[in-house]
Structures are given as structure tokens and as C-alpha cells.
Image (tube, rainbow, N blue to C red):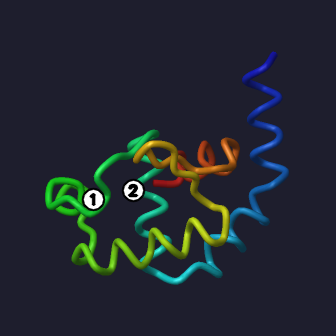
């Protein structure tokens, strides 16, 4: 029953999620998707993370991280980054 409720919420918000994603700059969108794939991401500017997710250089990742934090899409606690909105994260993971 819970899974069905979550699916319904994701479907109901799909247009909003698509619009939100469309409005993000490309580098922020790529990083947001990479963080979603990881669930809890660390060392975003490391060469291993960048290569794994086919991201641009570390300076681009650093500026994208700053933008996502300022827009409250991502939270950071003790160097661990997560997408703030869990439902949005679930939707993004399904799309990727």
C-alpha cells in the first residue's frame, strides 16, 4: 500500500519534477543525477566520482555543487551530499 501511494505521488508531481529539472543549468542537472545515483555521495570533486558519472572537471563540479546547495536541492552533512527532496530523488533515479 505504501509503494502504491509513493507511485501515485510521483506520478502526480511528474510535471513539476520535469519542469524543475529543465530549469537547472546542465552541469547542475548532471551533478544532481549523479548524487541521486549514489544516494549519499562523498568526494564530489574526486577524479573517481567525476569519471564514474562522466562529469566535467572538478572546478565545474565545485561550482555546480555550490549552486545546488544555494537552491536547496542538495544538503551536505559532514561531507556527505544528498538530494533534499526524497520524492524528487526517487523520481530522478527512475528517470536515469
* 2 is higher (above) or lower (below) than 42: above
How packed is label 1: few (under 14 Cα within 10 Å), some, or many (20 or more)?
some
Among all residues in the image, which is located at the extreme top?
A: 1
Number of disc labels: 2
Q: Nearer the viewer, residue 14 or 50?
A: 50
Among all residues in the image, which is located at the extreme front?
A: 78
Query: Which disc, if any, is residue 32?
Result: none
Q: Nearer the viewer, residue 62 or 4?
A: 62
Q: Quadrant of the C terminus?
A: bottom left
Sequence-earlier tag: 2 or 1: 2
Q: Nearer the viewer, residue 22 or 42?
A: 42
Secondary structure under tag 2 reads: helix
Whole-percent x, y for residue 94 in the image: 54, 46
Q: Which residue is mark 1?
A: 53
Whole-percent x, y for residue 95 in the image: 53, 54
Q: Is residue 86 left or right of residue 7?
A: left
Q: Is residue 34 left or right of residue 70?
A: left
Q: Residue at x 83, y 29 (%)?
A: 5
Whole-percent x, y for residue 32 in the image: 49, 61
Q: Residue at x 81, y 16 (%)?
A: 1
Q: Which residue is mark 2?
A: 34
Marks 2 and 1: CB-CB under 8 Å? Answer: yes
Whole-percent x, y for residue 28 in the image: 48, 74
Q: Residue at x 52, y 83 (%)?
A: 25
Q: Nearer the viewer, residue 35 or 59?
A: 59
* 57 is higher (above) or lower (below) than 92: below
Q: CA distance from mark 2 to mark 1?
A: 6 Å
Q: Residue at x 27, y 70 (%)?
A: 55
Secondary structure under tag 1 reads: loop
* 49 is higher (above) or lower (below) than 22: above
How packed is label 2: few (under 14 Cα within 10 Å), some, or many (20 or more)?
many
Amino acid at each position: 500500500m505504501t509503494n502504491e501511494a509513493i507511485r501515485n505521488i510521483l506520478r502526480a508531481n511528474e510535471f513539476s519534477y520535469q519542469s524543475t529539472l529543465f530549469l537547472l543549468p546542465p552541469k547542475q542537472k548532471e551533478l544532481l543525477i549523479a548524487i541521486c545515483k549514489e544516494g549519499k555521495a562523498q568526494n564530489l570533486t574526486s577524479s573517481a566520482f567525476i569519471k564514474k558519472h562522466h562529469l566535467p572537471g572538478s572546478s565545474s563540479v565545485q561550482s555546480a555543487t555550490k549552486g545546488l546547495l544555494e537552491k536547496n536541492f542538495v544538503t551536505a552533512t559532514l561531507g556527505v551530499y544528498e538530494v533534499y527532496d526524497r520524492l524528487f530523488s526517487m523520481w530522478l533515479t527512475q528517470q536515469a
